Structures are given as structure tokens and as C-alpha cells.
Amino acid sequence: MARLISGDFSEEEYEEARKNLRDTFIKAGLSQETDPYKEARTKEQLRRMATDIRFEDSDAVAGLRDYLYLRDKALEAASIDNDSLAKKGALPQREWLAGQVKQILQRNPEFYKFYYRFFKEELEG
């Protein structure tokens, strides 16, 4: 992360290094989910934030609202009930949503923090 900030790594190089490190730990059996409900709780909290009037004027939350709406449409189109587009059968919906994310980020650049932290891995499948 420090090398990304200092400019030694591009964002793509950073993401590749992070993914390789994560994969190394998974292959070694060192990855462990300590809270199996964390992801569901986080998604619920993001949904509440998206509808909270206190964040009405936030560009980041406006992007979040747009993203969640489009994500729900993609889940509906893929006929998925488990609230994840990470399945192989949802590839067309992931690709469509990834294209929509670019537009959301252009309109609401502050949304990138939410996107990279909570949603990017799901769209990568």
C-alpha cells in the first residue's frame, strides 16, 4: 500500500500483488473467515446508509445508491437469490455492471472508496 501511495506501484500492479498474496495464503490454508456474517451485515449497513437522509448530499453515497440499484437489477436478471454476482453464470451481468460502474465513478468520483473496498472483488468473479 505504501508503494502505491508513493507511486512505485500502479494501481494494477498493487491489485495484482494483493491478489497473489491472498491466493498464496489461501493455498497454504491460512485463510480463515472469522465472522461468516460480516459480509451480509456490511451489505445491510451499506443499504441503510444509501437511504439515510443524513447522507443525502454525499457524492459517495449517491454513487452507492446508483450502484446498489443497478446491482439489484443485475441480480434479478441473473435470477440469483444469494445476493452475489460472483457465480460463473452471472458473467454477462458482472460485465454489464462493471461498465455501469465506470459511469457511476465519472458522476460520483467519491464512490470509488466504497467500490474498491466492498464491491470490486465480486465483479471480478
Image: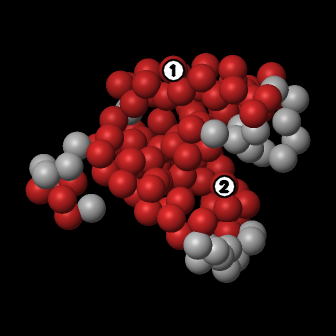
Q: Secondary structure at mark 1?
A: helix
In the rendered image, residue 64, in percent from the top left (x then y), is placed at: 53, 41
Image position, residue 78 (x, y; %): 81, 26
Residue at point 55%, 46% (across, down): 121
Q: Which residue is mark 1?
A: 99
Please state, as top left, top right, bottom left or bottom right, where the C terminus lies in the image.
top right
Residue at image x 20%, y 64%? 2
Q: Is residue 65 visible?
A: no
Compare marks 2 and 1 and give the one earlier in the sequence: 2
10 Å neighbourhood of mark 2: few (<14), some, or many (≥20)? some
- Image quarter in which the N terminus is found: bottom left
Residue 81 horizontal side relative to residue 120, left or right: right
Q: Which residue is mark 2?
A: 43
The answer to which of 86 and 39 lies nearer the viewer is: 86
In the image: residue 61, left or right of residue 49 = left
Q: Is 105 displayed left or right of 96 in the figure?
A: left
Is residue 91 visible to us here? Answer: yes
